[in-house]
Structure formats: structure tokens, C-alpha cells
Image (cartoon, grey):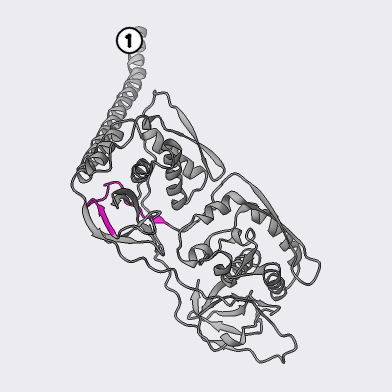
Amino acid sequence: MKRLFAACLAVLMWAPFCHAQDLEKEFEEFAKKQQSDFEAFRNKADAEFETFLREAWKKYEAFTPVPVPEHPEPPEPVTFDKTKPKLPPVEVKPGKPKIPEKPYTPVLVTAPTVRPGKPVRRTPVEFYGTVFEVATDVTDGLALSGNKEGNVADAWKKLCGRDYEQLVNDCMTVRKEKRLSDWAYLLLTKQIGVQLYGAEHTNEIVFLQMFLLNKSGFKVRLAKIDDRLKLLVAPAGTIYGVPYLNLNGDNYYVFEPDPHSSDKIYTYPENFADARNLICLNIEDVPAFEMEEQERALSPQGGDLKIQTAINKNLVDFYRDYPQCGVAVRYKTPMSEELRSSLYPQLKAAIAGKPEKDAADLLLNFVQTAFEYKTDGDQFGYEKPFFPDETFFYPYCDCEDRAMLYSTLVRDLLGLETVLLDYPGHIASAVRFTGDVPGDYIMLDDGGKFVICDPTYIGAPVGTCMDRYKTVAPEIIH
């Protein structure tokens, strides 16, 4: 009886174990099938795209570049006349609000699964003073034998047949860890190609960019212009001053166009199947580049306030290479943590305990008088709205740079809503205070009262609009 009981007990104990083994085996088989199905799908997409590349590319006529919006700033800032009699507040009528770019939500793309067991050789890549390591052994011996359709298709087929997943995975991991925006990621793929092939081998560089960006889910294409391979980029927004094509409803801009190139562009008819995301121009998080510190002391007029700041030159170099796009892209970009940590404690101490208007006045005087004025045309020879950190790096700034900086300071330090007022030839700020603050103002459609604050009207307090703009309806930039 005891033996029978022990046997029954053994069977009962063994049954769950066997069941667990069965479940584990079923899961392994399911995972293998999923991986097999994915490989088949991927191979099919790769093969279809190879066919597109191999066919004769179609000729298109490039659209004329959209001109860079002109903001003919005043050559000199205007100084407020404190001896003038104080006039009653004026309500400035708003013009049409600037239509913002439609919010863009990308498709989530995960880094490819890396096949285990194979040793990896990684190459250091320097990118804006920051060294990353990526697996580049998959590119060994990969070179285009020409720039014909067949040459490109052969290179695509060859690279797809290798274990490229580690390289793409490394690139996407760097992007996530270093908070690279889409445009920064685009530039990273170029730098990898430059370091692998040398800057003069542009065909190989743009091919590798196309491969890495397509495999990372981005809509980019190769094109032939004047018998040279170039990269076409589809952004979520407008890039000014660059020729482009409209393909399947998306605008594709020539990346780094040659100034005197032909407007005849040859490219293939379809995108890579997995390339579904546009290149977003917005910068949600500031890239985490290594710090190359540049210090700058600022002393606004009046009082004892002296500000010491630290700027990352590597970040400024990246901003210098950003394409010409809408002012709102700069306006919505946050200030870097390096600059915030040096600047904000000093400004917070200066406004501590002050009423909203007094604190806003102190910040306004800081922006009005701590920076020297010069138009973009005089300083750079072209229109260049600043990202927040750039205003602290370059020796001069103009009205739009000051207006964006002041709005950023008020939002971050006072927690108040701001807008930009875009007049013909001038940009100012306006602030929605929580209390009743007297002065010139503008009422928006939602009933919000925004008091005008002009960082280029030197010495003018909160609520003072330049006389010449009191009867001008500005466009509103949120």
C-alpha cells in the first residue's frame, strides 16, 4: 500500500513538471516560428526593395526651393524715452495666428534583434566632440563599384545578406542614450560613413546613410543628381532654401545640395517597406554631447546683477549645422542643462520674493541690456534664428533671438504662458500674467490677455509696445 501511495504521489508530482516542460517547448517553438516569420517578411521586403533599386530610376524636375522667410530687423535697437508722458494702455489687435506645423506622431520602431554568439568589433566614431562605438565589421569590403542602378542594388543585396543587425542596433542605442533628435541621428549616420570611407567617398557615405536610416524606419531615398548619388530626406515640416520633390504625398529635400547642381533628379518609384517615419525637425530633448565649456559673463544695466554662464560648444556646433526651418522649432527647443544649471540659480536668486511684474521686468531688463544687438545679415550674412544656447555663445543677437530667450526665461522661471508677436520686420514677446498687470496688451481668441514685453525696446518696462507697432496687427506664434 505504501508503495502504491508513493507511486501515485510521484505521478502527481511529475505531471506538473511534464506540463511545464511541454509549455516551455511550445513557447520555444512559437518563438522560433515568430522569428522565422519575421525573417521571411524582412527578406521579402529587402528583395522587393532591391528590385526597385535595380530598375531604371525615373527622372523628376525638382521644385524651386521655398525661400527662407525674411525678417528684416531694424539695424539698431530702439531706446525707450523715459521722459515721454505715460499714455493710456493700448490694445493691439492680433493678426492671423501662424498656422503651426501639424503635430507628427511617428511609428514606434524597435532596434533589430542581434543574433547571439558572433564576436563584435566596434569602431569609435567622434560626433560633435563625443565618441561613440558602433559595430562596423559588417561594412568591411563594402564599396560601390559605380553609381548605376545595378551597383546600388548589388550593394543593398550584399549588405542585407550580412549580419547588419548589430550595427543598426548600436546606432539606435546611441540615439536613445544620447537623446539624439531625428536630425542629429541623420547627421550621425553621415559621420559614420565619413569615418569609414573618408569624406571624399560621397557615394558610399550616402548609400550607408540610406541603409541605416531605412533600417531605422525613416523615409529617405537615394537619388542621382549630375551623375552623383545624393540623399533625399522627408521631414515633418518645411526646410527652406533646398530643392525638393513630392513623392507619394511627402516632400523629399536634397540633403546637403550642391549650389549649382541640376534640377533634374533621378530616383526609384517606391520607399523601402519598413521606412514609415518622417524626419522630425523638432528637438524635444537636448542632445547629450560631451562638454566643451565656453564661459561668458553678462552684466545687464542697472543694479548689481552679474551673470556667469557656461555653454557647450559641441552643442552650438550641432545647432550651427541645423537646417533652415520654422522659427517655432527654435522657440520650442529647451535650454541645455549645462546652461540652465549655471544661469537659472543666479536669476532665481535675483527674482526671489518679487511680484510677477517686478520679476518679469528684471528678466526683461536682463535680455534688453546684457546682450549686444546686431542683425543676422550683419553677423552671418544670412537669416539665422538662434536656439536658446546660441544666444549666450555668439557675440550678438537680434530681436527674434531676444524674444525667444525672454519667453523661455518667463516660462521656465515664472511659469507663465508666453507668445511671440511677429510684426513685419520685428518680433516681440507677450506674457499672460495671473494678475492684472497694466500696459499695452493683446487679446487672443481664447480670451487670454497677453501683456506686451519687448526685449529689443531698450529700457522699456513690461507693458510697453513700440509706437510704430501699436497699430500693426502681429501674427501670433505659440
Q: Residue at x 33, y 35 (%)?
A: 143
The span picked out in magenta is 264-280
> Which residue bears the numbered disc 1?
4
Q: In this rendering, would 149 be left or right of 378?
A: left
Residue furthest out toward the front? 260
Depth order, front residue of 467/100 = 467
Query: Residue at horizontal 36%, vertical 28%?
Result: 115
Give the vertical position of 164 relative to 349 (above or below): above
Q: Position of residue 303 (x, y in %)?
A: 80, 70
Q: Secondary structure at mark 1?
A: helix
Quarter of the figure with residue 91: bottom right
In this orientation, does residue 399 appear?
yes
Could you say where residue 267 lies in the image, as x and y percent from the top left?
25, 52
| Secondary structure mainly formed by the magenta segment | loop
Q: Amino acid at mark 1?
A: Leu
**396 on left or right of 362:** left
Q: Is residue 352 something one can see in this rendering? A: no
Residues 468 and 36: in front is: 468
* Vertical arrangement, residue 211 with respect to residue 252, above or below: above
Rendered position, 239 above or below 20: below
Percent position of residue 298, x then y: 73, 62
Q: Is residue 346 magenta?
A: no
Image location of residue 146, percent across then percent down? 28, 40
Residue furthest out toward the right: 304
Query: Looking at the figure, which quarter contains the N terminus?
Result: top left
